[in-house]
Image: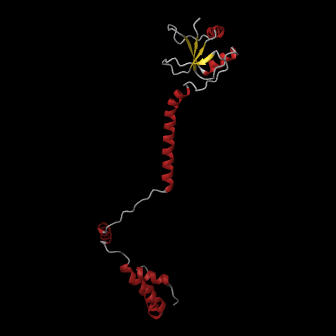
């Protein structure tokens, strides 16, 4: 009989028909290769399954064995991106806060005023206004300014006060200088004081 390992497996499984079992067994006794295969496979059948308490023993060994804690290190990329985000936030807040105080600094009178006529001079009146104050002393220039203020519907800052003053935006100051070429004011928010009539 030629070697047929499928028949040897069927013999071991108990699925080989009764009539063929005797011929396969006689072949196994006469063939050393089939006999070795039969002994190896038949020896595995009983030991192939783990013992019934195998899982419980493994889990108990895991619980009782001291475990090392693995320290997780923060990757450099996370550290750098977190630092960059914090820097952006701090920079944004500081710029936002300095914008409020920066506006106050920007509206203080400059040490050297940019004016082109002797009739307009920066003047520190000691008022509560944070706008730089420019005083116009020439009566003819004051009359032209008053006329322009009426046309533009710009009212006095202190209508009941002792002085005649107007708060102007940078755009209004530029428009006033364009309307009255003899008047040269800086293009910024300012307060313009006219001499008494």
How many labels were placed on the picture?
0
| Residue 50 seen in render | yes
| Quadrant (top left, top right, bottom left, bottom right) of the C terminus | top right
Q: Residue furthest top?
A: 197
Q: Nearer the viewer, residue 161 or 7?
A: 161
Please tell me which residue is depicted at 48% across the width and 19% down the height of the picture.
Answer: 128
Please tell me which residue is depicted at 38% across the width and 80% down the height of the picture.
Answer: 45
| Residue 23 seen in render | no
Q: Can you give x and y, in whole percent of width and height, for residue 177 in the image?
A: 67, 17
Left/right placement of residue 88 relative to residue 13 reads right
Q: How is the image coloured?
A: secondary structure
Q: Nearer the viewer, residue 154 or 145?
A: 145
Q: Can you give x and y, in whole percent of width and height, for residue 8 in the image?
A: 46, 84
Vertical placement of 78 versus 20: above or below? Answer: above
Q: Nearer the viewer, residue 94 or 184?
A: 184
Q: Residue furthest right?
A: 181
Q: Residue furthest front?
A: 118
Vertical placement of 118 versus 35: above or below? Answer: above
Vertical placement of 82 versus 105: above or below? Answer: below
Q: Nearer the viewer, residue 67 or 166?
A: 166
Vertical placement of 27 versus 110: above or below? Answer: below
- Residue 47 falls in image quadrant: bottom left
Q: Can you give x and y, in whole percent of width and height, for residue 96 in the image?
A: 51, 34
Q: Can you give x and y, in whole percent of width and height, for residue 154 in the image?
A: 59, 12
């Amino acid at each position: 009989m030629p070697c047929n390992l499928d028949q040897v497996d069927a013999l071991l499984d108990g699925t080989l028909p009764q009539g063929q079992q005797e011929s396969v067994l006689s072949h196994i006794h006469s063939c050393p290769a089939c006999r070795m295969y039969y002994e190896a496979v038949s020896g595995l059948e009983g030991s192939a399954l783990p013992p019934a308490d195998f899982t419980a023993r493994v889990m108990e060994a895991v619980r009782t064995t001291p475990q090392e804690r693995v320290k997780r290190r923060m990757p450099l990329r996370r550290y750098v991106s977190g630092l960059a985000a914090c820097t952006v936030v701090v920079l944004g807040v500081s710029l936002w806060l300095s914008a409020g105080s920066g506006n106050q600094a920007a509206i203080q009178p400059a040490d050297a005023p940019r004016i082109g006529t002797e009739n307009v001079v920066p003047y520190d009146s000691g008022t509560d206004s944070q706008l730089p104050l420019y005083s116009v002393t020439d009566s003819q220039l004051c009359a032209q300014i008053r006329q322009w203020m009426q046309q533009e519907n710009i009212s006095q800052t202190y209508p009941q006060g002792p002085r005649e003053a107007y708060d102007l935006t940078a755009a209004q100051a530029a428009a006033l200088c364009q309307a009255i070429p003899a008047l040269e004011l800086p293009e910024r928010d300012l307060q313009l004081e006219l001499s008494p009539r």
